[in-house]
Amino acid sequence: MESVTQGASIIRSFIFKKDIDWSALTDGITFPVMYQAVFGSVDGRLMVRGEKKPVSIIFESKVYSATIQNNDFNKSYNESHPRDILQIRYKKDLKEALAAAFAESYRFFSEKRNLEKQTRESKRIKLPEDQREYLALYSTGKDDLFFMDAIYAEDLSAIAEMVSDQSEEAVEAELNFEKEDRTASIIEVTRTEKIRRLNRKISDNLKQLYGFRCQICGAIHDEPYGCNVAEAHHIRYFVQSLDNDASNQLIVCPNHHRIIHKTNAFWDPKKLVYTYPNGYSEGLLLNYHL
Ligand SMILES: [Zn+2]
Ligand SMILES: [Zn+2]
Protein backbone atom coordinates (compact mmCIF):
# COMPACT_ATOMS: atom_id res chain seq x y z
CA MET A 1 0.00 0.00 0.00
CA GLU A 2 1.16 3.52 -0.71
CA SER A 3 1.77 5.43 2.44
CA VAL A 4 2.29 8.83 0.90
CA THR A 5 1.19 11.72 3.02
CA GLN A 6 -1.16 14.24 1.56
CA GLY A 7 -0.14 17.57 0.18
CA ALA A 8 -1.72 19.95 -2.26
CA SER A 9 0.93 19.36 -4.89
CA ILE A 10 0.40 15.62 -5.17
CA ILE A 11 -3.33 15.59 -5.35
CA ARG A 12 -3.78 15.65 -9.11
CA SER A 13 -2.29 12.34 -9.98
CA PHE A 14 -2.96 10.41 -6.86
CA ILE A 15 -3.49 6.72 -6.84
CA PHE A 16 -4.58 4.04 -4.44
CA LYS A 17 -3.94 0.39 -5.22
CA LYS A 18 -6.08 -2.27 -3.60
CA ASP A 19 -5.74 -6.05 -3.52
CA ILE A 20 -8.79 -7.80 -4.87
CA ASP A 21 -10.64 -9.59 -2.09
CA TRP A 22 -14.27 -10.45 -1.51
CA SER A 23 -15.35 -7.05 -0.29
CA ALA A 24 -13.48 -5.21 -3.08
CA LEU A 25 -15.66 -7.18 -5.50
CA THR A 26 -18.98 -7.09 -3.74
CA ASP A 27 -19.18 -4.11 -1.46
CA GLY A 28 -16.55 -1.45 -1.82
CA ILE A 29 -13.01 -0.55 -0.99
CA THR A 30 -11.68 1.01 2.14
CA PHE A 31 -8.59 3.07 2.57
CA PRO A 32 -6.95 4.98 5.41
CA VAL A 33 -8.36 8.37 6.26
CA MET A 34 -4.99 9.96 5.45
CA TYR A 35 -6.13 9.83 1.82
CA GLN A 36 -8.94 12.17 2.69
CA ALA A 37 -7.23 15.20 1.12
CA VAL A 38 -7.32 13.40 -2.21
CA PHE A 39 -10.51 11.40 -2.17
CA GLY A 40 -12.59 13.05 0.50
CA SER A 41 -12.91 16.73 -0.17
CA VAL A 42 -16.22 18.46 -0.64
CA ASP A 43 -16.31 22.03 -1.94
CA GLY A 44 -12.74 22.60 -0.87
CA ARG A 45 -13.11 21.26 2.67
CA LEU A 46 -12.51 17.80 4.08
CA MET A 47 -15.34 15.41 4.87
CA VAL A 48 -16.30 15.18 8.50
CA ARG A 49 -16.87 11.95 10.36
CA GLY A 50 -19.81 10.01 9.11
CA GLU A 51 -20.22 12.25 6.06
CA LYS A 52 -21.02 10.79 2.65
CA LYS A 53 -20.72 12.18 -0.82
CA PRO A 54 -21.82 10.90 -4.22
CA VAL A 55 -19.06 10.28 -6.76
CA SER A 56 -18.70 8.90 -10.27
CA ILE A 57 -16.27 6.14 -11.11
CA ILE A 58 -15.12 5.34 -14.60
CA PHE A 59 -14.42 1.65 -14.99
CA GLU A 60 -13.77 -0.03 -18.33
CA SER A 61 -15.30 2.79 -20.37
CA LYS A 62 -18.49 3.13 -18.34
CA VAL A 63 -19.46 5.63 -15.68
CA TYR A 64 -20.89 4.32 -12.40
CA SER A 65 -22.24 6.20 -9.45
CA ALA A 66 -20.98 5.34 -5.99
CA THR A 67 -20.53 6.99 -2.62
CA ILE A 68 -17.50 7.82 -0.56
CA GLN A 69 -18.04 7.92 3.13
CA ASN A 70 -15.93 8.79 6.10
CA ASN A 71 -16.58 5.94 8.50
CA ASP A 72 -16.42 6.84 12.11
CA PHE A 73 -14.51 4.24 14.06
CA ASN A 74 -15.10 6.22 17.17
CA LYS A 75 -15.00 3.48 19.75
CA SER A 76 -11.48 2.33 19.05
CA TYR A 77 -10.13 5.74 18.21
CA ASN A 78 -7.07 7.06 19.91
CA GLU A 79 -4.76 9.89 18.94
CA SER A 80 -1.76 7.85 17.86
CA HIS A 81 -3.74 5.28 15.91
CA PRO A 82 -6.72 6.92 14.29
CA ARG A 83 -8.96 4.18 13.04
CA ASP A 84 -11.19 6.24 10.80
CA ILE A 85 -11.35 4.98 7.28
CA LEU A 86 -12.70 6.19 4.00
CA GLN A 87 -14.90 3.81 2.15
CA ILE A 88 -16.08 3.76 -1.43
CA ARG A 89 -19.37 1.90 -1.65
CA TYR A 90 -20.54 0.57 -4.96
CA LYS A 91 -24.06 0.29 -6.27
CA LYS A 92 -25.50 -2.78 -7.93
CA ASP A 93 -24.26 -2.00 -11.44
CA LEU A 94 -20.63 -1.57 -10.42
CA LYS A 95 -20.77 -4.70 -8.25
CA GLU A 96 -21.96 -6.63 -11.27
CA ALA A 97 -19.35 -5.10 -13.54
CA LEU A 98 -16.56 -6.02 -11.10
CA ALA A 99 -17.87 -9.54 -10.57
CA ALA A 100 -17.90 -10.02 -14.34
CA ALA A 101 -14.51 -8.40 -14.91
CA PHE A 102 -12.83 -10.42 -12.16
CA ALA A 103 -14.86 -13.55 -12.88
CA GLU A 104 -12.17 -16.02 -11.85
CA SER A 105 -11.36 -14.30 -8.60
CA TYR A 106 -15.05 -13.96 -7.90
CA ARG A 107 -15.49 -17.70 -8.37
CA PHE A 108 -12.45 -18.42 -6.22
CA PHE A 109 -13.83 -16.38 -3.31
CA SER A 110 -17.37 -17.74 -3.67
CA GLU A 111 -16.17 -21.32 -3.51
CA LYS A 112 -13.84 -20.67 -0.59
CA ARG A 113 -16.55 -18.88 1.30
CA ASN A 114 -18.96 -21.74 0.77
CA LEU A 115 -16.38 -24.22 1.98
CA GLU A 116 -15.65 -22.18 5.03
CA LYS A 117 -19.33 -21.65 5.68
CA GLN A 118 -19.10 -17.91 6.15
CA THR A 119 -16.94 -18.18 9.21
CA ARG A 120 -15.14 -15.10 10.32
CA GLU A 121 -12.04 -16.44 8.63
CA SER A 122 -13.67 -16.23 5.25
CA LYS A 123 -13.43 -12.46 5.40
CA ARG A 124 -9.69 -12.73 5.33
CA ILE A 125 -9.37 -15.05 2.36
CA LYS A 126 -6.69 -13.87 -0.02
CA LEU A 127 -5.89 -14.80 -3.59
CA PRO A 128 -2.93 -17.13 -4.05
CA GLU A 129 0.30 -15.24 -4.76
CA ASP A 130 0.36 -16.08 -8.48
CA GLN A 131 -3.29 -15.17 -9.00
CA ARG A 132 -3.21 -11.77 -7.35
CA GLU A 133 -5.29 -9.05 -8.94
CA TYR A 134 -5.71 -5.38 -8.12
CA LEU A 135 -7.89 -2.36 -8.49
CA ALA A 136 -6.09 0.91 -9.02
CA LEU A 137 -8.04 4.05 -8.16
CA TYR A 138 -6.92 7.35 -9.67
CA SER A 139 -7.92 10.87 -8.84
CA THR A 140 -8.77 13.01 -11.84
CA GLY A 141 -8.50 16.53 -10.50
CA LYS A 142 -12.26 16.63 -9.97
CA ASP A 143 -13.53 16.00 -6.44
CA ASP A 144 -16.33 13.75 -7.56
CA LEU A 145 -14.83 11.80 -10.46
CA PHE A 146 -12.44 8.88 -10.14
CA PHE A 147 -10.98 6.40 -12.52
CA MET A 148 -10.61 2.71 -11.75
CA ASP A 149 -8.26 0.33 -13.51
CA ALA A 150 -8.38 -3.44 -13.21
CA ILE A 151 -4.98 -5.09 -13.02
CA TYR A 152 -5.68 -8.72 -13.82
CA ALA A 153 -3.56 -11.76 -13.08
CA GLU A 154 -3.13 -12.11 -16.86
CA ASP A 155 -1.77 -8.57 -17.09
CA LEU A 156 0.84 -9.44 -14.52
CA SER A 157 1.80 -12.71 -16.15
CA ALA A 158 2.03 -10.99 -19.54
CA ILE A 159 4.35 -8.41 -18.00
CA ALA A 160 6.35 -11.11 -16.22
CA GLU A 161 6.92 -12.84 -19.54
CA MET A 162 7.82 -9.60 -21.27
CA VAL A 163 10.43 -8.56 -18.72
CA SER A 164 11.88 -12.00 -18.05
CA ASP A 165 14.85 -11.55 -20.40
CA GLN A 166 15.38 -7.83 -19.86
CA SER A 167 17.69 -6.01 -17.49
CA GLU A 168 16.20 -4.23 -14.49
CA GLU A 169 17.59 -0.90 -15.66
CA ALA A 170 15.98 -1.25 -19.08
CA VAL A 171 12.63 -2.21 -17.56
CA GLU A 172 12.73 0.65 -15.07
CA ALA A 173 13.49 3.08 -17.88
CA GLU A 174 10.61 1.61 -19.84
CA LEU A 175 8.21 1.81 -16.88
CA ASN A 176 9.05 5.44 -16.32
CA PHE A 177 8.94 6.31 -19.97
CA GLU A 178 7.00 9.52 -20.45
CA LYS A 179 3.76 8.96 -22.26
CA GLU A 180 0.62 10.85 -22.80
CA ASP A 181 -1.42 10.82 -19.60
CA ARG A 182 -4.72 9.09 -20.11
CA THR A 183 -5.78 8.76 -16.51
CA ALA A 184 -8.99 10.64 -16.87
CA SER A 185 -9.89 9.36 -20.28
CA ILE A 186 -12.21 6.56 -21.20
CA ILE A 187 -9.73 4.83 -23.45
CA GLU A 188 -9.01 1.15 -22.99
CA VAL A 189 -5.39 0.57 -22.28
CA THR A 190 -3.16 -2.34 -23.08
CA ARG A 191 -1.64 -4.52 -20.39
CA THR A 192 1.75 -2.94 -20.51
CA GLU A 193 0.32 0.55 -20.56
CA LYS A 194 -1.85 -0.16 -17.52
CA ILE A 195 1.11 -1.34 -15.51
CA ARG A 196 3.37 1.42 -16.79
CA ARG A 197 0.77 4.00 -15.89
CA LEU A 198 0.30 2.53 -12.43
CA ASN A 199 4.02 2.57 -11.85
CA ARG A 200 4.53 6.07 -13.21
CA LYS A 201 1.71 7.51 -11.13
CA ILE A 202 3.10 6.01 -7.96
CA SER A 203 6.61 7.20 -8.73
CA ASP A 204 5.33 10.67 -9.72
CA ASN A 205 3.57 10.93 -6.36
CA LEU A 206 6.76 9.93 -4.60
CA LYS A 207 8.98 12.29 -6.60
CA GLN A 208 6.70 15.16 -5.70
CA LEU A 209 6.65 14.05 -2.08
CA TYR A 210 10.46 14.35 -2.01
CA GLY A 211 10.55 17.52 -4.09
CA PHE A 212 12.59 15.58 -6.69
CA ARG A 213 15.41 15.07 -4.19
CA CYS A 214 17.43 11.89 -3.88
CA GLN A 215 16.37 10.00 -0.75
CA ILE A 216 19.97 8.89 -0.21
CA CYS A 217 21.99 12.09 -0.70
CA GLY A 218 19.29 14.76 -0.79
CA ALA A 219 20.61 16.11 -4.08
CA ILE A 220 18.33 17.91 -6.46
CA HIS A 221 19.47 18.60 -9.96
CA ASP A 222 16.60 20.57 -11.43
CA GLU A 223 18.08 24.01 -10.94
CA PRO A 224 19.42 25.73 -12.95
CA TYR A 225 18.43 23.45 -15.81
CA GLY A 226 14.68 23.74 -15.40
CA CYS A 227 14.05 20.02 -15.53
CA ASN A 228 14.12 17.27 -12.94
CA VAL A 229 15.97 14.02 -13.32
CA ALA A 230 14.96 12.19 -10.13
CA GLU A 231 14.40 8.50 -10.80
CA ALA A 232 12.33 5.79 -9.17
CA HIS A 233 14.25 2.68 -8.18
CA HIS A 234 12.56 -0.62 -7.34
CA ILE A 235 14.08 -1.96 -4.16
CA ARG A 236 13.18 -5.55 -4.95
CA TYR A 237 13.89 -5.54 -8.65
CA PHE A 238 10.70 -5.18 -10.63
CA VAL A 239 11.69 -7.90 -13.11
CA GLN A 240 11.58 -10.36 -10.22
CA SER A 241 8.94 -8.92 -7.91
CA LEU A 242 6.57 -7.12 -10.35
CA ASP A 243 5.98 -4.95 -7.32
CA ASN A 244 5.46 -1.29 -8.15
CA ASP A 245 3.93 -0.27 -4.84
CA ALA A 246 5.39 2.80 -3.17
CA SER A 247 6.70 0.49 -0.45
CA ASN A 248 9.03 -1.01 -3.06
CA GLN A 249 10.22 2.26 -4.57
CA LEU A 250 12.98 4.69 -3.68
CA ILE A 251 13.45 8.10 -5.26
CA VAL A 252 17.10 8.55 -6.14
CA CYS A 253 19.38 10.78 -8.18
CA PRO A 254 20.76 9.31 -11.43
CA ASN A 255 24.20 8.81 -9.85
CA HIS A 256 22.91 6.81 -6.92
CA HIS A 257 20.61 4.87 -9.20
CA ARG A 258 23.52 3.92 -11.44
CA ILE A 259 25.72 2.96 -8.50
CA ILE A 260 23.04 0.79 -6.89
CA HIS A 261 22.61 -1.21 -10.08
CA LYS A 262 26.26 -1.31 -11.03
CA THR A 263 27.25 -2.71 -7.63
CA ASN A 264 24.02 -4.63 -7.06
CA ALA A 265 24.05 -3.08 -3.57
CA PHE A 266 22.41 -4.95 -0.70
CA TRP A 267 19.33 -3.33 0.85
CA ASP A 268 18.52 -3.90 4.49
CA PRO A 269 14.74 -3.38 4.74
CA LYS A 270 14.80 -3.05 8.54
CA LYS A 271 17.62 -0.55 8.85
CA LEU A 272 16.83 1.10 5.49
CA VAL A 273 20.49 0.99 4.55
CA TYR A 274 22.33 0.10 1.35
CA THR A 275 25.59 -1.79 1.70
CA TYR A 276 27.96 -1.85 -1.26
CA PRO A 277 30.25 -4.77 -2.11
CA ASN A 278 33.31 -2.92 -0.73
CA GLY A 279 31.64 -2.73 2.68
CA TYR A 280 30.63 0.92 2.50
CA SER A 281 27.05 1.54 3.57
CA GLU A 282 24.70 4.48 3.60
CA GLY A 283 21.19 5.07 4.83
CA LEU A 284 18.46 7.43 3.77
CA LEU A 285 18.72 11.15 4.31
CA LEU A 286 15.05 11.59 3.43
CA ASN A 287 12.30 9.14 4.16
CA TYR A 288 8.60 9.77 4.51
CA HIS A 289 7.18 6.62 3.05
CA LEU A 290 9.15 3.50 4.01
ZN1 LIG B 1 21.81 10.57 -4.61
ZN1 LIG C 1 16.61 0.84 -10.16
Image (cartoon, rainbow, N blue to C red):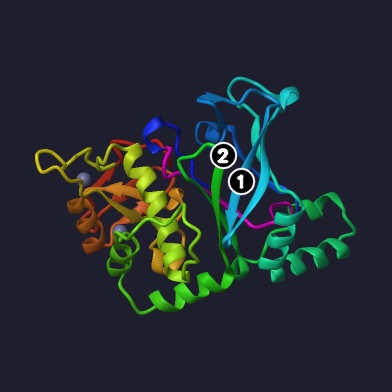
Q: Cα distance, mark 2 to mark 1?
A: 6 Å
Say left or right for 158 vs 214: right
Q: Name the quadrant containing residue 168.
A: bottom left
Which quarter of the frame holds ligand 1? top left
From the viewer's perspective, is residue 239 above or below residue 29?
below
User: How many numbered marks are there?
Assistant: 2
Residue at figure coordinates x 67%, y 24% from the top left: 49
Asked if residue 266 is among those painted magenta in the image, a careful observer would answer: no
The residues colored magenta run 11-25
Q: Which of the pair 172/39 is nearer the observer?
A: 39
The disc placed on residue 56 is 1
Amino acid type at image mark 1: Ser
Q: Position of residue 19 (x, y in %)?
A: 61, 55
The disc placed on residue 284 is none
From the viewer's perspective, is residue 39 above or below residue 130?
above
Can I make out residue 268 in this image? Answer: no
Amino acid type at image mark 2: Asp
Q: Position of residue 56 (x, y in %)?
A: 61, 46
Residue at figure coordinates x 28%, y 62% from the top left: 264
Q: Name the quadrant containing residue 222.
A: top left
Disc 2: residue Cβ within 8 A of ligand 2's nearest atom: no
- Dot 2 alpha-carbon crowd within 10 angstroms: few under 14, some 14 to 19, many 20 or more: many
Q: Name the quadrant containing residue 208.
A: top left
Q: Position of residue 180 (x, y in %)?
A: 34, 59
Label 1: which secondary element:
strand
- Name the N-terminal-most of marks 2 and 1: 1
Reading the image, the residue beneath label 2 is 144
From the viewer's perspective, is residue 40 above or below residue 189?
above
Say left or right for 231 vs 144: left
Tag 2 and tag 1, C-beta contact below 8 Å = yes
Residue at figure coordinates x 20%, y 57% from the top left: 259
